[in-house]
Image (cartoon, rainbow, N blue to C red):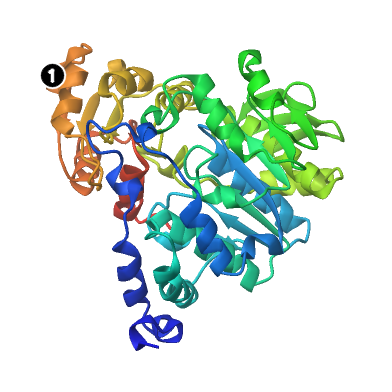
Amino acid sequence: MSDRLDPAVWAEHPGEAFAWLDAHVNLESLGVPPGLDRRAHAPTLARMEALAALLGSPELEYGTIHCTGTNGKGSVCRIAGALLMEAGMSTGIYTSPHLERVNERMSWDGVPIEDPDLAEILGRIAMIEPHLPAVPSYFEILTGAALTWFADVAVEAAVIEVGLGGTWDATNVVDGDVAVITNISLDHVEYLGPTRASIATEKAGIVKPGSVLVLGESDPDLASIFSARECAYAVVRGRDFGVTRNDVALGGRVVDLFTSRARYEDVFVSMHGSYQADNAAIAVAAVEAFTDHALPADLVADVLGRMRSPGRLEVVGHQPLVVLDGAHNVAGAEALARAMAEEFAAAPRTYVVGLLREKDPAEMLAALGVGGAERLVCCAPPSTRARDPEELAAAARALGLDPGRVEVVHDVDDAIERARAVTGPDGQILVTGSLYVVGAARRTLGVG
C-alpha cells in the first residue's frame, strides 16, 4: 500500500487528506455551468451507493432523522440533535455547508470532528476510490465520511441534513427512521425544477417505506405529493404539531408548542426570527417520532433556551448592532426582513450583501427591503460562483436606491471594514446574501 494513501499517515498529516478532498468536483463551489440545465442530465445515486457499500454500509448501524426543505433544515437538525443529546443519546449531526471549516459539517455529541479523525477516514475513502463506478464528488466523499465516523464512534442516533433536494442527494443512501420536510419554496430551480410542485416531488424522495413523515409544509396544494409516498404514518403541521404562541422576547422568542403527545408552554427560544418557533416545533415533533414518546417539558425548555444557530440572525456586535444572516434565497430574505422589523428597533442600517450568480439581484434586494437602507455595500462572496457586485449595485440603483448610498467593495473583509467606518454607534450593520459572505464575516469579526 502506498504511504500516500495510508489512512494512518494521513491522520498524522491531515493537510494531505484535505488537499485530496479539495481536488474533487465541488458543486457547492462550481454550481451549474451557464447554459446547462442540470435536470437534463440523468441524476444517479450509483456512486454514493457503491461508496457506502465499500465502506461497510455504516448508515445501517444507527437510527436516523433525515431532514430536507427549502429553509430551516439546518436549524431543525441542530435543535433535534440537541434534544436527542439532552435525552441521553449519543448523537451525530451532519449539516452543510460549513461557514469556516469543513469539520463543522459533522459533530458527535456537539463536538466537530478533529482533523486527524477526518483525515484518517478520508484516507480510507481514497483507498477504495479506484473501485467506484466513477470518481465521487466532494459532497459524496464528506457524506461517506460522516456516515462512517458515526458508525466508528457508535452513535445511537444521527441527524442528517440533505445537501440539495432529496431523491438524488448523496444523503439519500440513508433510510431515515424519521423523514422531515420543513417547507417548500422556489430555490435551486436549475436542479429541482421551476415550480414548488416539482421541488416538493424531489424533496419527497427522502420519505421511505416504514419511515415516519414529519411534514412542516402546510400548503394543501402540495399535500398530495407527500401523501402519495409510502410511510408508516405522517405527523402534519397544524394537525399534529405546531405553534400557538410566538412572541418577541429579549434575545429571542417566547413560544407555546403542541404535539400530538404533549404541550410545551411558555418556552424561551434563544434565537431571533419568528420562523425559529416553527423550526423548534418541527424538531420536537421529529424527536418525539424518533423516540416514540413525549419529551420532558424541562428538557425542551433547557435545550431551546440555549440554542444557537451560527450565521442565522446571529447578533455578533453592538454599537453598532451587527447581525449576520445567510439568507440565500428570496423566502429567506423576506423572513430576514420581517425579523429585523419585528425584533430590532428602527435605526440607520448599512447592508453588506454578496450574492452567488444563481440568485437574481433585483429579487433578492427587494426581498431584503434595501429601499430604506442608509447604505448598501456590495461585495463578492469568496466563491467561484460569486456574482459580480457591480451587477448587484446596478440592480439596487434600478430599484430606486440613491446611487450615493450604494458602494462596491469587492472583498468581504474590506466591505465589513467599510460598513463599520460609515455606520454610527446607534446604527445597524446587516451582513447577508450568501453563507460564503457570512462565513468570511465571522472570520473578520473574530466570531468563535
Residue 63 visible (yes or no): yes
State the residue position of label 1. 403
Residue shown at the point (36%, 88%) measured from the top left: 3
Quadrant of the snapshot with the C terminus:
bottom left
Query: Could you tell me which secondary element the residue under label 1 belongs to?
Result: helix
Q: Nearer the viewer, residue 34 or 378?
A: 34
Residue 345 visible (yes or no): no
Residue 200, x across and y down, in percent: 56, 26
Residue shown at the point (23%, 27%) measured from the top left: 376
Side of 107 relative to 41 (left or right): right
Residue shown at the point (72%, 35%) measured from the top left: 213
Q: What is the three-letter code of the residue carrying label 1? A: Pro
Quadrant of the snapshot with the N terminus:
bottom left
Side of 229 relative to 422 (left or right): right
Q: Nearer the viewer, residue 155 or 176?
A: 176
Find residue 91 and report its image quarter: bottom right
Residue 384, x across and y down, in percent: 22, 46
Residue 382, x across and y down, in percent: 24, 48
**Relative to 27, residue 183 above or below:** above
